[in-house]
Image: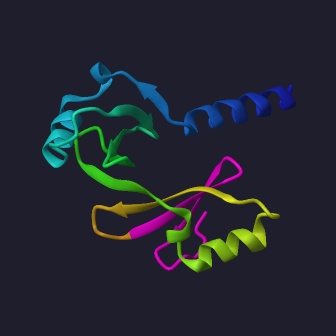
Amino acid sequence: MKYLIIVLFVALSINTTFAQKISLDKVPAAVLKSFQTKFPSIKKAKWEIENGNYEAEYDENKIEHSALFKADGTLIETEIEIAVNQLPKTITDYVAKNMNGKKIKEASIITEVGGKKKYEAEVGGKDYLFDENGTFLN
């Protein structure tokens, strides 16, 4: 019985950590208004709920972007895809040393509203975060 409870808990935990795609009519009006105000040139976005926040994914100049909002419309952060070779060398060195020969598939730079930057590297289907100096975070 303990085993079953643990399995159910893990399954539910995993399910809630992934983003869930939603239709435009499920996005709060405050979020849509904030998105349209901050990104007026973007006419088409895909929406997801991620840990209770709303993420708009869109292309701008053929580059993938996203913007993450609280339900009240407050912008939390933006993310822009970058070429893997634009990552700091400390990140590529970390991956080479610690990821058993796996390669970085995608990379992005995340900018929080206050200006703090982080890097994200997708390796083996998982996203790894690094601070602006390239130090591993999680």
- Give residue 122's quadrant in the image: bottom right
Residue 38 in the image: above or below residue 129: above
- At a point 33% along the width and 47% down the height, the residue shown is 67
The quarter of the picture where the N terminus appears is top right
Magenta-span inclusion, residue 13: no
Residue 37 in the image: above or below residue 26: below
The magenta-colored residue range is: 117-138
Q: Nearer the viewer, residue 33 or 101?
A: 101
- At a point 32% along the width and 22% down the height, the residue shown is 26
Total labels drawn: 0
Magenta-span inclusion, residue 121: yes
Q: Position of residue 47 (x, y in %)?
A: 37, 32
Q: Position of residue 33 (x, y in %)?
A: 15, 36
- At a point 73% along the width and 28% down the height, the residue shown is 8
For residue 127, side relative to residue 32 (left or right): right
Q: Position of residue 137 (x, y in %)?
A: 58, 68
Residue 109 in the image: above or below residue 60: below
- Give residue 53's quadrant in the image: top left
- Give residue 31's quadrant in the image: top left
Q: Nearer the viewer, residue 15 or 62?
A: 62
For residue 64, side relative to residue 123 (left or right): left
Residue 45 in the image: above or below residue 118: above
